[in-house]
Amino acid sequence: MAVIELSKERKQIIMDDIKKFFAEERDEEISDFKAELYLDFILNHAGVYIYEQAIADAHNFMIEKTDELFTLEKRIVK
């Protein structure tokens, strides 16, 4: 699987969330550099599983919607 790429804006938002988490939950201030290291670790180790689950969820959703579409089918009675 390819590396997960994030825009600079999204990456900064997530890094800010990581820094906020450390401040609130661990009473620890971390730098952008450290937040980026944590983010890279998460993306490299958990990202593939999150991505695969998202694909499976989307696939199941599409199957459900396709099945619903067939309930709209009109039967021709002769």
Image (cartoon, grey):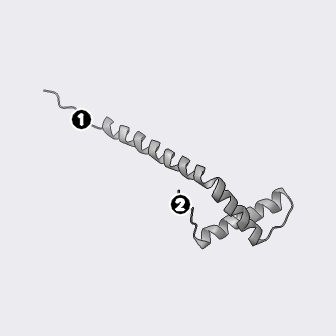
Q: Report x, y in % for residue 69.
A: 33, 41
Which residue: 74% across, 66% down? 35
Along the horizontal axis of the image, is 33 left or right of 10? right
Q: Secondary structure at mark 1?
A: loop
Question: Which x, y percent locates residue 62?
Answer: 41, 45
Return the mark for residue 74: 1
Task: From this view, report whether residue 43 is shown above or below residue 8.
Answer: above
Instruction: Please state which of the two labelled residues, at mark 2 or mark 1, is closer to the viewer.
Output: 2
Q: Quadrant of residue 72?
A: top left
Which residue lies at the image location 56% right of the left edge and 62% below the top edge?
3
Quadrant where the C terminus sits is top left
Which residue corresponds to mark 2?
2
Disc 2 or 1, which lies upstream in sequence? 2
Where residue 18 appears, as percent x and y from the top left, is 73, 62
Total marks in image: 2
Position of 4 with respect to 74 (left or right) is right
- The amino acid on which the numbered mark 2 sits, given as a three-letter code, is Ala
Amino acid type for the residue under numbered disc 1? Lys
